[in-house]
Amino acid sequence: MKKIIVACLLGISVLSFIVAKQFLFKAEVNNENLGPTLAEVRNVKNELRYKHSTGFFWADAAQSQKLYNGSEVFTGPSSEALLEMRNKDVIHVPAETLLRITENAQAGTLALNLERGSLQVEGKGQGKSLSVRVGNSDLVLKADAPFGLFAKKDASGHLTLSMASGTVTLENGNQKKTLGAGEALNIADPAAATEEGKEADKDSIQGAVGGGGSGTSEVSAGGGGDIKIAPESEVKKVPAALTMTAVEKEKLVLIEPAPKKVLYGQGLEFFRWKGAEGKKLTLQTSRTADFLTETRSEDVSEMKEAVIPKDLGTGEYYWRLVENSDGIPHFSETRTFRIERLGTAQIGQPSLTFKERGKWTLNVPVKDAKPGEKFHMQVGKNKGFEDIFDEYEGAMPLRSFLDMSGEYNIRVRKAYGNSLYSDWSDPAKVIVRPPLSAPLLSKTEEKIGATGLSEMTLSWSPVPYAVDYLVQIADGPKFSKILKNVVVEKAPYELKHNENVPGYMRLLARSVEGEYSPPSEVYQVKGVIKGPAIEKKEVLPPVFEQADSTPQFHLVWTHREAAKRYRVELSRDPKMAGSQMLDTENVEFFHSVSEEGWYYFRVWPVVDESRLFGLPTPILAVSYGKPGPLITPKTMTPKKNEVFLVPRGVPVSIKFTWSESPENEWYVLQMSQDQNFAKNTEIKVEAQEYILKKPMKNGQWYYRVRGRNKYQASAWSDTGVFYFGVSQ
């Protein structure tokens, strides 16, 4: 997009300019259909104006003003603002800066188009990356951790980036470059320089008066009411690779105070550094790592040290040096120090953390303790601390290992180094309880209840310091594999289970900290073997053409490994009255029956009753009724009186087909030259067609088909007839 800057128009009166400014800065009222929010205004000092992409007028921005794709903002003289991007990055916009915010969906970035001025980016290293527009290209800023970055665009459109903290990877096309703290780059778009100045006068005049210009235009304003009109290019430009040139600066080396040093205000303390002799140098001190709030700035040009102010309050401070001789800030590393005042330590409420049986970790908090502070802790067995059980001096956390039950007294004081301590805190006290004891367990006789579960009642006396109990069943006396683990609040407890193997049962007490007591006495418990799963149940009709065959009650079930054999209980009554018991060692069972109607049954596994309970299946039923006749097939080929004349030497192929029925498991095909089938050839066919390929006698042939299964035969089909002959 061509950018034409109209700085001023000669011949326009002051009155006309005021009228135009009031017109351009008329407030927008409709923010609908602007898409998702890309940024919000978090803080404004003096003047901040904004304009959305669909609007023409500029409006005053205030706290929480939302900015959308294509929104523009600018700050007036002596003004600044903070913007929070959707990815939580914070943008500091200083005075007389014009910025456009867009979303580059193709690159997956939130784009900053710095039209004029400078920015300070405080990145969080999360969410969508930011990109900065340079000429016709986007420079993507990628970071996995927080960073601080200063950006400034000069009159030629070149962008200078200077890292204040952290590390950022810059990506443009195939180019990648990592920029670390204290480094700076000058970035330019070679292609953008060739477009500067084309059709400037013509387009600026048309845009200013709003008439006749081809294409659409963006109107934006800078501090003091300057107006610029940016016509949108009708031809999409292909971005060229950006040039990145390192800006050489002398390294700023921080000497004092050392990183994370704690100052107690006992005498004069100094900032000391090396580098940037003869350059404009600023010392910055802030309560925040981004130096955006609660920041002091002091000109320390031509200096190598400065006094740390006495009026700094207690707490943590960040400090750095900024060399800014050419308008581009060059940053040193950022260090921290703390300001503290000598005073007594106040101990918090000590706590005990359970480690294992009879062993505890004592945790001692100190109120308002700061990172880096050191303390001296004593743990004594009496109030006067003559008998010291444990002692520690160092940084937080303050801990001690206690492996004896009883009462302990604790006190703490601050350690400032060089044998400098605060007064002792008021003492605190903890009591270490004794370990849990094993429960004394008793139980009733084990039996099968009405629900088919093994049942027994467990009783025990309460264990001191126990909050609940665990009933465990395992497959072995060492309890290496737990089959059942039940949490119980108190005795008595009705234990019910259906574990299918003999096992062992015990009880453990548990404390609120998670300590487990030694186990109770171990008892053996029986396994519960359920009745087998029935896979097939039926009454089979008598076998066809077998004179002594009777209907057969037939069962198939899954095997239970613990079953020695099985017992089938069979009755004609649904309540199993008058049942008969039939034993078998197999998982398939046949029994002759004679009557039609319902048969009721259940299957029992026969087990070792000293170790197992054997339970029957539920009462199941199967009905028997004499089956109806099978469906009689209908012949289809050969057709009636069809003639097959086969030349000698040619293979025979005669296809017999008939209708199908699902009840027929196979078919019987009969062929005969006798109409009464006294002498015939009989063929078993398991499909609904048969192809005859063997030679036969010449003459007239009769055929018929009937359906079959193991227990029945259908009626014969109608008799078909065909003629067969072999020619000479």
Image (cartoon, rainbow, N blue to C red):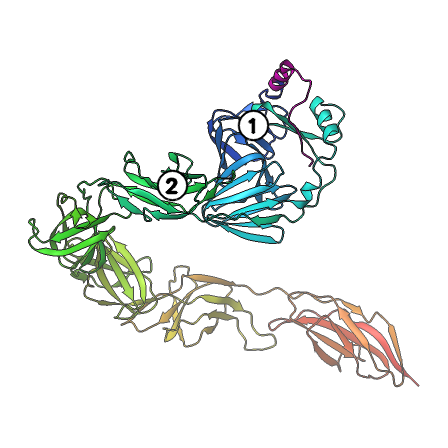
Check disc 2 and report its element: helix, strand or loop. loop
**Counting other residues with Cα less than 10 Å from the Cα at mark 2, is it few (<14), some (14-19), or many (20 or more)?**
some
Residue 667: x, y in percent?
69, 73
Residue 4 is a magenta residue: yes
Q: Is residue 343 left or right of residue 120?
A: left
Q: Tell me the number on the disc at residue 303.
A: 2
Q: Tell me the number on the disc at residue 50.
A: 1
Residue depicted at x 55% and y 32%: 97
Q: From the viewer's perspective, is residue 699 above or below residue 380?
A: below
Check disc 1 and report its element: helix, strand or loop. strand
Q: Is residue 282 left or right of residue 646?
A: left
Q: Nearer the viewer, residue 261 or 398?
A: 261
Residue 648: x, y in percent?
89, 85
Span highlighted in magenta in the image: 1-22
Residue 331 is a magenta residue: no
Residue 655: x, y in percent?
80, 74
Residue 317: x, y in percent?
34, 40
**Counting other residues with Cα less than 10 Å from the Cα at mark 1, is it few (<14), some (14-19), or many (20 or more)?**
many
Q: Nearer the viewer, residue 413 or 200?
A: 200
